[in-house]
Every structure is written in structure tokens, then in C-alpha cells.
Amino acid sequence: MAEAASTSATTIATTSASATTSQTAPPGRAASVSRPWAVSAAVLAVVYGFWAAEIGRDAGPITGYNVLLGVVSGILFGAGFLALHVFGRGLPRELHAAAWAAFAGVSLGFAYSLSGESVLRSTGIGLAAAVLVLAVTFYRFYTQED
């Protein structure tokens, strides 16, 4: 009976170990993006693109420049968001938080600079946003660490 119990325990341990290893990606395999993250990146990119185009338009007529500004801004924002999500997980928590902070600061600073304000004020707004995002993301990554 003891032999049957140990064999059963070994089978369960092997089964649960293979279940956990099959869920992880093998070494050298490219990182993938889950569907909710891809959808959220696309939605945020469209919103940011429309926002940048609207600020750049400044209540004037819609021009080719505004459309181009919105499309390029949206594509770059979405690509940066997705890249941070995919590759940021491999960074230490300090660098991961700093990367999100830099992304948020640059995004907000650029959008604010489109309104015609000075470069110094746009930089200040971007830095303030980056400091706040750094504090929040570092706290989140520090408390969620395994």
C-alpha cells in the first residue's frame, strides 16, 4: 500500500509539474501579447492620435498635416505602449517603473507642446507627470513582486 501511495503522489507531482511548465514559454521564444493588451493599446493609440490631431488643429480646418500628425502620433504611442508591456516585464522593477514614467512624461509633454506653450513649460508638465507615474508604478511593482 505504501508503494501505491508513493507512486500516486509521484504521478500527481509529475502531472502538476508538467502543467506548470507547459504554460510558460520555452527559452528563445518571442514574447507575445494577449488580446486585451493589444485591444487596449489600439484604443489608447486612436484616442491619443485624435487628441494630438485636435490640439494641433487649434480650431482651424482639418488639413493633411493634422491627419498625418494624428496618425503618426497614434502609431508611435501604441507601439511604445505595447513595447513597454511586452519587454518591460524583463526589466528590474526600478527600470520598469522608470520606463513607464518616461513614456508617460514624453507623451504628455509632447501633447502639451502642441498647444503652443513654451518648451520649458511643456518640459515641466512632462517631468511632473513622469515623477507621479514613477511613484505610482514603482509602488505597484514593488508590492506585486514575488
Image (cartoon, helix red, strand yellow):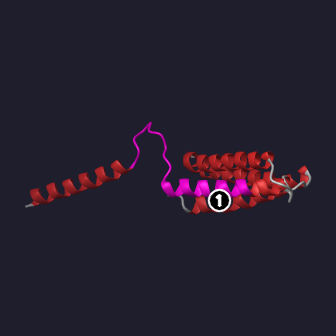
Q: Residue at x 68, y 46 (%)?
A: 76
Q: Say which residue label 1 marks.
A: 137
Callout 1: SS: helix
* Residue 102 x/y as whole percent: 72, 50
Looking at the image, residue 51 lies above or below residue 83: below
Q: Residue at x 65, y 47 (%)?
A: 80
Q: Residue at x 34, y 48 (%)?
A: 22
* Residue 10 x/y as whole percent: 20, 54
Quarter where residue 37 is shown = bottom right
Magenta-drawn stretch contains 31: yes
Q: How many marks?
A: 1
| 96 lies left or right of 16 | right
Q: Residue furthest top?
A: 28
Judge by depth and name the residue closer to the eye, 10 or 43: 43
Judge by depth and name the residue closer to the eye, 49 or 12: 49
Magenta segment range?
A: 24-50
Q: Residue at x 22, y 57 (%)?
A: 12
Judge by depth and name the residue closer to the eye, 81 or 94: 81
